[in-house]
Amino acid sequence: MKKISFIINVDWFLISHRLPIIMEAKKRNFKVSILTINTGQAHILRELGFEVVELPTSRSGLNVFNELKTLIRIISHLRKFKPNIVHNVTLKPIIYGTFAARINRVEKIVNAFSGLGYVFTNDTRTYGLHKLILFIFKLLFKSNRITFVFQNNDDIKLFLDSQILVKSQINIIKGSGIDLNQYNYIPPPLNPIVKFLLPARMLWDKGVYEFVKAASIIKKENPENFQFILAGKIDEENKAHIPLEKILEWEKDYQIKYLGFVQDMKRLIADVDVVVLPSYREGLPKSLIEACAIGRPIITTDAPGCKDVIDDGRSGIIVPVKDYLGLSKAMLSLGFDKEKRLNMGLEARKKAEKEYSIIDVIDKTFIIYEEPIS
């Protein structure tokens, strides 16, 4: 029996973005172990029959003792479990998991970048950390046993230009995929007012501020025509999180509606007219893939990952990063044109059917697992 270990930052992210892959591994008779931070959902994975090893670190924490303890725990587990494949997802697990897997001489290491995150958003405050991470990557990734999965071409270009990887190590899989039967096309709602939704964690680099600024501009001229909705948790572990007090202030000053974390995103997306994500950088955002599948037009930025989800002018509109004036104009152009929203939503569904099926994502992932090492 083949064995595979998944190392991922938090349990909820694995459940929301990678569960179909680990379920398929189990179906194909892999023995599976999962190494992750338990935020209260690890029991779900255990109930599904998976071995879960809890990691003592935090996603953004830099406590040296906890980080060393985490690395030792990963090394120790891989030594005992002896996996044929280690699949690392997100930045810190990729660094720790690659190091631990190389020490244990694991046959194949698969590193999946779901986006490069805030450190790679061209913010001058993260320049030093950005350079340090690239240096660590150069030391770790020189091995033909390591293969990489990226979600967009911009991230690939960064790694090739930095001479961290060679082309033979690189694969592209567009996002984490979606069940197109579960997320079926739903006709637009007959809302008396047009609803714009930003579905994301409440982080500055998700473009939440730009969304609020655009909404405030639109509200001045059209106070009764539109509603602006934020849906997503306040991720306090993330250094870029927006405090609840600020969001409540926006609610009061600009009549923004904040829903917090929403369990049933399908129902929420189906109830709105336009989905907006003015993010600074992504892998390939699942919220936009869900919007495509349901058939909602999208407004997003020309940032890596975001611009890859839609076809500008067909299934949505692309605006510059941090340009809230351009964002407000794009929102108005769709807000006052019902037929345009309908047509773009239909095109979005076609794109989802062509590019974002979970079946394709699973098939491509297992091809990578089975590829011989050159």
Image: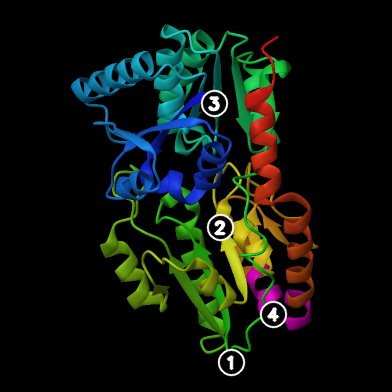
Residue in the foreground of this view, choosing between 290 and 281: 290
Asked if 63 appears above or below 257 in the picture, the reply is: above
Dots 2 and 3: beta carbons under 8 Å? no
- Please report whichever mark, 2 or 1, sits nearer to the chain's N-terminal start: 1
Write down the residue under mark 2.
Answer: 287
- Please report whichever mark, 1 or 3, sits nearer to the chain's N-terminal start: 3
Residue in the foreground of this view, choosing between 288 and 195: 288
- Residue 283 at x, y = what percent? 58, 41
Residue at x-position 67% and y-position 56%: 319
Q: Label 2 amino acid? A: Ser
Left or right of 181: which side holds 59? left
- Looking at the rendered image, the quarter that the C terminus falls into is top right
Write down the residue under mark 1.
Answer: 192
Q: Nearer the viewer, mark 4 or mark 1?
A: 4
Dots 2 and 4: beta carbons under 8 Å? no
User: Residue 187 has which mark?
Assistant: 4
Residue at x-position 69% and y-position 21%: 371
- Please report whichever mark, 4 or 3, sits nearer to the chain's N-terminal start: 3
Counting other residues with Cα less than 10 Å from the Cα at mark 3, is it few (<14), some (14-19), or many (20 or more)? many
Left or right of 307: which side holds 205? left
Write down the residue under mark 3.
Answer: 111
User: Magenta region's main secondary structure?
Assistant: helix
Q: CA distance from mark 2 to mark 3?
A: 22 Å
Residue at x-position 75% and y-position 77%: 342
Q: Label 1 amino acid? A: Pro
Residue 261 drawn in magenta = no
